Every structure is written in C-alpha cells, then in structure tokens.
Amino acid sequence: MQLFRQVKHLVKKEILLEWRSKYALNGVLLYVVSTVFVCFLSFVSTNPVTWNALFWIIMLFASINAVSKGFLQESRGRQLYIYTLASPLALIISKTVYNVLLMAVLTLIALGFYILVFSYVPQDLGLYVVATLLGSLSFSIIFTMVSAIAAKAGNGGMLMAILSFPVIIPVIILLIKLTKNAIDGLDRSVSLDEIGLLLVINVLVSAVTLLLFPYLWRD
Amino acid sequence: MMYKTWWKILAAVLVVYATVWGFLSSAPELPIIRESIRNLYFHVPMWFGMIVLFSISVFYSVKYLGSNNPDHDLRAVECINVGVVFGMLGIITGAIWARFTWGQAWSFDVKQNFAAIALLLYFAYLVLRNAIDEEQKRAKISAIYNIFAFPIMVVLLFVLPRLSDSLHPGNGGNPGFNAYDLDSRMRMVFYPACIGWILIGYWIFTLKYRVRILEKNNL
C-alpha cells in the first residue's frame, strides 16, 4: 500500500513537472515532426515496407531521446531528496509508468502525423495501433532501465545509445514483423506469436529491472 | 580448484584427441554438408564454451552485488573477456561453414544475425567498463548491466531463432544434428570436444584472473 501511494505521488509529480514546462513533450514532438518531414522530402512516396521500417527508425531515436531525458536531467540535489523520501522500487516504477504514458502519447501523435504526411494507411489499422502501443511500452521499459544505468555511470548520452542498441534489436525485429503483418492486412491470429513474445520480453525486462534497480540506486 | 593441474591436462588431452580424431575419423556421408560436418567439433564447442563462461560471469556478478568483494568483479570481467573471444571464434567458424554449405560467409541467417547482436551486448559491457573511472562504481554498474544483459542474450540466441525461418540445423523447421549423426559415431568426438574446449576456456579465464589479482596486489 505504501509502495502504491509512493508510486502514485511520484508519477503525479513527474506529470505535473512535465505539464508545466512541456520540455520533453515539445522537444521530442519537434524532433519527430522534423524527421518525418525530412523523410517525406527525400522519399516523397514509399512502398509499404520502407514506410514501416522508416517509422520504426524514427520512433527508436525519438524514444531514446524522450526516455533518456528522464534520468539525465535530474539534478543531484533532487535525486538525493527523493532517495530519502521514497523506496527505490517506487522510484523506478514511477519513472517507468511516466515514460510509458509519455511514449504512448508521443507515439500516437507521431503515428497520426506520419500517416497524414505520407497519406498511406495500413490495411489493418487497429492491429497497427496496438503494435505501436506495444512498441512504445517495450521501448519505455527497456530504455528507462538503460538510462538509469547510463546516468549512474556519468557519461550520459553516448553511453545510453551504446548500451541500448543491442538490447533493443530483438524488440525492433519483432515489432517490424508484427507491423508488417498489420500492413499486409493478414489475419490477426497470425501475429499472436509475436505479440506474445513481445509481452514476454517486457515482463522479463521489468522483472530484471525491479530486481536490479535497488542495487543501482544505493550510492 | 583453480590451482590444480589434473583438469588442465585433461582439457589439453581432450582437445588434442578431438581435433586429431575429428579429422582422421570417418564422417557420415551427407549431401551438401559432406566433409565440412567436421566443423561441428569446433563450431558448437566454441558456443558452448561462451555460454558456460557467460553463465559463470553472471554468477560472479550476482555474488559481487551481495558481497562488494572486488575479486568477484574481476572474475566476472575476465570471464566475459574470454567468453567474447570464444563467441567471435564461434561466429568465424560458423561463417567458414556457411561459405561451404549455404553459399556465402554471411548468409543473413537469423541465428547468425542474432549471434552477432548478442556479442554486441557484451562488447557494450566492455565499453561501459571503460567509461567509468572509479573502481567500486565501475564494478557495481557493470555487474548490474551484466545481469541485465544475460537473459536478453539467452532470448536472442535460443528463443528468437526457433520462431523464424532459419537455415540453421535445429531452428526454423530444420532437424537438429541428431538427424545427421545417425550412428552416433560423431558423438564420440563431439562430447569430448565440448568438454575439452569448455575446460580450456575456464583455464584461460583462471590464468587471466590470476594475472589481474597479481597486478592488483602489486600496485
């Protein structure tokens, strides 16, 4: 009960801070819009496979940007303050929940903008949206933990990219396969394997994160 | 255990036996693969050695988190150092084999790609270590990353290839090697080769670890 209350308060604090400055939201939105625009200028129109792959590349880098801001921008003093108040589990859960919410919003807006600019709609839009939401969930969970590790290591941005790249590749491959099924309009039952595996990876990474973060947090 | 000699002599004898008899003994006559099936005595033991070494490394990383004993951290990192070499040899022997059986050295087979990515995970571990100067911090953060990366590696190497089309025996609907080794002749060289190479890998690890301990004590 204590944990749940702490998590609720921390998530509220993150959302409130973000809503006041809208720094991460606007920053990443601008990044996504610019990237989509540049891609549109370069490609003008693409075949569905390229469209799909391009979307995931854009989402990957946008996610890394969005989630790494979470840990890297917090000052030492504030981190110490939170350390005295809340349990590390509450902190990592709240950061993950906040990142999941942030990424869900950003992903949906990015997807809408992407569909609009390229004027191409996947055949199975429902499954595509589900896949992108699953993707944003996976990205948030994995990147939150990796950015926590990178933030502690001190060298920040570059380390985050190096550490996260190999870890995220299986997720990307599954997502691309899943969204390709959605584009081709295949029957939904065909994709159940990929969805199941994505959920399994999410659960696995979450479990490892919950086990390891308390050790990381002890300074 | 580390200072005894019996298992080192056993390892040397097993590897020499496996190599010599592997080339001299008769191999099953199968189409396409033909004589290159002897690569089985090198390629698979390399991977088994790598998995064993990475498992030992994770074991010591977990121990380090509990004990904060720097020796445990040294064991973890030296295991990974040797394991990475075994992994690279596994990929190289696999590429040589692929050139004769599948046509190109890098056939973009699922398992080949995932094996390379799994190795990237551990290269990222080594980069992470280099990025942190302070010893205790380095040990703690790299232990956490090691424990984080290990299940992902297991998923990459064992779970994902089974789900997709693959040229590899044992994945993607191809029969495993039991179907090739019809009269169990190959097992007589294969099992000793596995055990021998694993023991050799462990031997190299113990030597590197002992050198590190000596360096640390001489500082």
Image (tube, grey):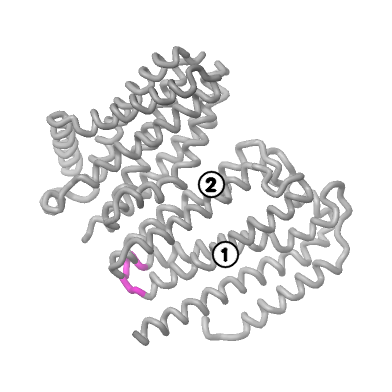
Residue B22 pos. (x, y %): 80, 67
Percent of width and height locating residue B34: 85, 53
Q: Position of residue A124 (x, y in %)?
A: 49, 15
The chain carrying label 1 is: B
Residue A189 sits above or below residue B38 on the image:
above
Q: Is residue A31 inside the magenta stretch? A: no
Q: Residue at x 43, y 21 (%)?
A: A41
The C terminus of chain B - image quarter: bottom left
Q: Residue at x 40, y 53 (%)?
A: B148
- What crowding class fits label 2: few (fewer than 14 Cα within 10 Å), some (14-19), or many (20 or more)? many
- Helix, strand or loop at label 2? It is helix
What residue appears at the point 75 percent right and 59 percent down from the top-left corner?
A: B39
Instruction: Classify mark 1: helix, strand or loop.
Output: helix
In front: A80, or A63?
A63
Q: Amino acid at mark 2?
A: Leu
Along the horizontal axis of the image, is B111 left or right of B18?
A: left
* Residue B156 badge: 2
**Which region of the structure is painted magenta?**
B64-70
Which of B193/A173 is in front? A173
Callout 1 amino acid: Val
Give the residue displayed 44% in from the left and 16% down from the top.
A118
